[in-house]
Each structure stands twice: as C-alpha cells, then as structure tokens.
Image (cartoon, coloured by chain):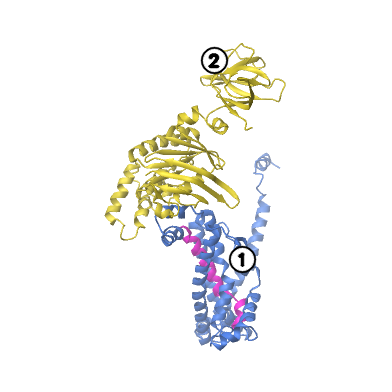
Chain colours: A blue, B yellow
Amino acid sequence: MSAETSTSRRFRDAATETPLARYILVAIAVGFMALILLMPLLLVFIEAFRQGIPAFFEALGDVDALAAIRLTLLVAAIAVPLNLVFGVSAAWAIAKFEFKGKTFLTTLIDLPFSISPVISGLVYVLLFGANSYLGPILKGWGIEILFAVPGIVLATVFVTFPFVARELIPLMQEQGTGDEEAALSLGANGWQTFWYVTLPNIKWGLLYGVLLCNARAMGEFGAVSVVSGHIRGLTETMPLHVEVLYNEYNFVAAFAVSTLLALLALVTLALKTILEIRYGEQLSASRKH
Amino acid sequence: MDVTINNIRKDFGQFPALHDVSLSVGTGELIALLGPSGSGKTTLLRLIAGLEQPTEGRIFFGGEDASHKSVQERHVGFVFQHYALFRHMTVADNIAFGLKVRPRATRPPANEIKTRVADLLDMVQLTGLEKRYPAQLSGGQRQRVALARAMAIEPSVLLLDEPFGALDAKVRKDLRRWLREFHDRTGHTTFFVTHDQDEALELADRVVVMSQGKVEQIGTADDVYDRPNSPFVFSFIGESSHVPVTLKAGEILFQGESIGLSEQGGDCDGTLFFRPQDVVLTDHSNALSGKVTASRRLAGTRIAEIDISGSGEAHHIEIEVPLEATVVVGGDLSFRPTSWKIFRDAA
C-alpha cells in the first residue's frame, strides 16, 4: 500500500463510505427503482402502442372509454372542490381555535387513510343499500345513491378527504394566529382577514394538497369499485374501465386508458416537484403522501 | 385618549392570568407594563386591545365603556412582538391595509391612501422602501413598518408587545430613543410590554410593575426604584440584597444582635432590603459583618461578596465597596446600609 492511499484514507470523513460501498449502494437503489418504478411505467406505454398508434387512438375513442373519462373528470370536478372547502374549514378550525374534541377531530380526518378503501366503499353500501335504512327512503324520493354517480362521488370524497386538511393543518399551526390578529386589529372583518391574509399565506400548501387530492380522486379504485356496480358507459370510471378491459383480454385498450392515468401521475409528480423546489419553505413539513 | 381599567380579572380555564387589575392612564402617557414572564403583562395588553375578553371587570376608553367592543371597534394600533407583517404584501401595501379594508363609505380614495402611506413612511424614516417585501428588511425596519401600519388607522391607543424583544442590543438602544421621540411627536396614549427594566425605566412616563397576575406598583421610574412598595418590586427593579431581621424596641436585630440601625414601630419579624451601593463600611461591632468570599472589580466600582451567616445558614450578599478600601478574600468586613427598607412579615 503506498503512502498516498494511506494518507487519503486517514483523512476521509468519518461518515463517508469507501468508493466500493458507495457504488454498490447506488447500484442497488437505482436497480430497485428501475425494476419497481420505471419498468412498469414503461411497460404501460409499450403495451398501449403494441398494435400501433391508430389502434391506441381507436381504443381511446371507444364510446365506453370516453364515458369513463368523462365520469372520472366529473367525479374529480365535484370531489376536489368539496374537499378543498372541507379541508380548509377543518384545518382552519383545528389550527386556529381551541375546542373540546380537537384531538378526536384530527384523528377522524385521518380515518380514510387508515382503513382499506374497500371498507370505505362497503360502508356506503351498508348506508345506502337496498337493505339499509336510508336507501329505500331516498329511492322513494327518486334519488339513487348506490350504483350511480352520487355514490361514486361520495366514496371518492371520503377517500380523498384527508389530503387538503392534512397538508394545511401543520402549515397553519406553524403560522399561528399573529397575522390574523394583526388584520383584525387593523379593522378587517373575518372574511377580509381570510381572503387577504390567511389564504395568501397558505396558497402553495393548498395547491399542493389539491394536486394530491385530484390525483387520488381520479385514480381511486377500491372504494369506487364497491359502490359503482360496474355499469358500462354509466358508472365506470377510468380505473374501473381499465380493469374490465383487462379482464376481457383487451390489453391494448386497457393499457391505452392506463396511459392517461399514468400521464396524470407524471404531471402531478412534475407539478409537485416544481412546488417543492420553488415554495418548499411555504409548504408544511409533513410531506409524506 | 385616556384609558381606565377597572378590576379586570382574566382566567384561562382554571388558570388565573390576571386578578383584580386596575389602572388609570391619562391622554398621551407612555406606560410600560413591566414584569417577569407569566406576570400577565401581555394578557393585559391583549385585553386592552380586545384580542382577549376579560372574565370580569371593565375597560373604558375616554369615559366610554369598551369592555364589550370587538377589536375592530376599539380602533387600537397594535404592534406585535414578531411584527406579524403580511409577508406577501409590499411595505406600502402592509401600511395601507387598515385603510383599504374599510367599508366603501369611510374608505379614503386611492390617491389619498397613497399620500398617507408616503407620510407614514416618512414619519418612520423608511421612505424609498415602499416596494420592498418584509423579508427584504432588517429587524429594526420591520419594527418600524409594523408601527407605521398600526398608525395608519389613526388609532385611539397605541399598544406595543415587547417592541424591542426581537432586536439585537445596538438596534434596541437606538430604537428606544427613537420611539420616545416618536411618542412625544405624535402624542398617542401608548402602552408597551417589556421584561427589561432598563427599557421601562428609561422610556416610560410611568411603569406598571406586575407579578403573578397582579399589579405590584404603579409609578414613575423614581417611584419604583427609590420607593418600592413591596419585596417583589425591590428585588425585581435594580440590584438589591435582603436579610431576615427582627424588630425589637425600635432596634433592628440580625440573628439576635443589633446592627446599629433603628426603625419605628412595634416588635415583629421582617426582611431588610437595601441596594448594594447604599452601604458604608464600618469598624463598629454592631453592624452586618461576615467573611469576604469573593471580590470583583466592575468598571468604576468593586463588588464584594460577603457571607454574613455567622453560625446560621449560609447567606451571601453583595455590596459595593470603595476602590481604595482593602478587601481581602477570607478576611472579615463590617458594613451598615445607609438607606434601606423593612418589609414586615404578615402577622
């Protein structure tokens, strides 16, 4: 061993691995990611275009596929704004006020994360099904919840409820009530305080939460599958439609619709990364979804 | 505007933050609320602002009962400890906020708001910084923006929560002097909260000394320093030493022996308070005496630490001794307070 290598070894930082160990660790990480994350994504696109570009667009232009896309957009268009309002209200209440049962409410908000989506769906079947108490009454008024769009929306709202609230609560707690008190002392009313002071302070965190909420709303399978009833062209969202096509061995069509969901995921990921880079300090610390 | 506070009590759940606080402040006075943390000084300030509601008691603004008025109706200028500037607004927008949120009927026209903002910026000496964001300002500049923002609504009372708390020592001193001038120029009735006695004594017309939710003493700097009315005020304001004593037949006894001081009144136990500089060294045997345990040179004086316990429990006190006096660590030293106060124990 030469004097030079022994010197360089002696002065290496305590926390730095040997080059060999580093290469092995990096190789394991990259290999794992390629296998588990990138390859499936790539395969989705390869399978979708296996029979050429015309077949791809033909599959997407199918009446049922278009209906599924429309329904998915409709469900997201209802669920996301609802959760935006619920999320902001819940976060506002939890972060800015002291009241009894606050811990319980916080736990309740996390409920959809901790139970299986299938159970979330089943809850609505129990609540609105033919043998339930509410179902027949609503049916008598001509309102269909289960195996119809309202049920799908309800299940989606339930599953995606925590995203906005969970993003905002730590952020608003950290910001405290100082700015709001300042606005009030300057004569602003409650609405002005919210609109001119609170909302600008949380806007990037809110956008971040909405982004994640939307991705999940469009991609949700389990809960929606239980309440949808799988009526082709009527109650099938994109994820459900993909499954049906796949089970019919219609691989090209299944993967063609899948590419749309994959693209949605990629766009979400890109926007999320941009938000994190540009407004990282204004987002809450609990970025774990 | 004069402010009167009548028997205010404030409880946070089971915890009493303020009990039975009364205070009367004249128009244009500069008042310091001074006390250690947890003394209730900030709570009192927030009650005056209307950011908190009292559990009991009343607050009057200029003879009018303001107890049930909302924070908006009270029309106070509140400067928060960490300024609470709106970070997404420019300096000019921050200052204009209080005018822009007024209902259309009382809102000044846009060009008038602009003039007002310019005047206020000039008043706090920040002209030229109107386009900056709070993050681009120094601590002292943010402080002055917060003050200008509070002044923009032409408040009846100005309330400052630890106005210099978040600044470094040099800026603190400059800003202190500047605030005094500012107050004298604008003449607003002003309350400020501080835990720094130098700040309170130097700046305020009157100091409200608070402890454990109660007002201990209200008075000028001279009053609270020279004539403290409670053991708390004596030990909180300035340096002081205290020894347990007994009064007997007009004599003050320490551990049963006379220390050469006399005091009128009946026999009882009490505590003798004095300032380290209010002592004289003596050769008399009837004096406070003990072994010197340490001696420190401090700028123009020398501080001697003396253990006066004798046979009893160790009791160290500090006194100032003349520079020319010979002080030997381990040697004996006798002294008598020249100016003191005795607080009698409650019978």
Q: Which residues are magenta?
A: A201-228
Q: Distance from label 2 to label 1 (Cα)?
A: 71 Å
Residue projecting furthest to the right: B311
Q: Which mark is residue A110?
A: 1
The residue furthest top is B283
In depth, the one of B3 and A271 nearer the eye is B3
Classify mark 1: residues with Cα within 10 Å, few (<14), some (14-19) or many (20+): some
Instruction: Give coordinates of residue A253: x percent, y percent.
Output: 56, 83
Q: Amino acid at mark 1?
A: Asp
Which one is in front, B59 or B34? B59
Q: Is residue A48 visible?
A: no
How many numbered discs sit on the rendered protein?
2
Query: Residue B202's x, y, as percent?
Result: 44, 32
**Taken as a whole, is the magenta stretch helix, strand or loop?**
helix
Could you tell whether B44 is left or right of A243 in the image? left
Q: Mark 2 sits on what residue? A: B323
On screen, residue B28 versus residue B16, left or right, reads left
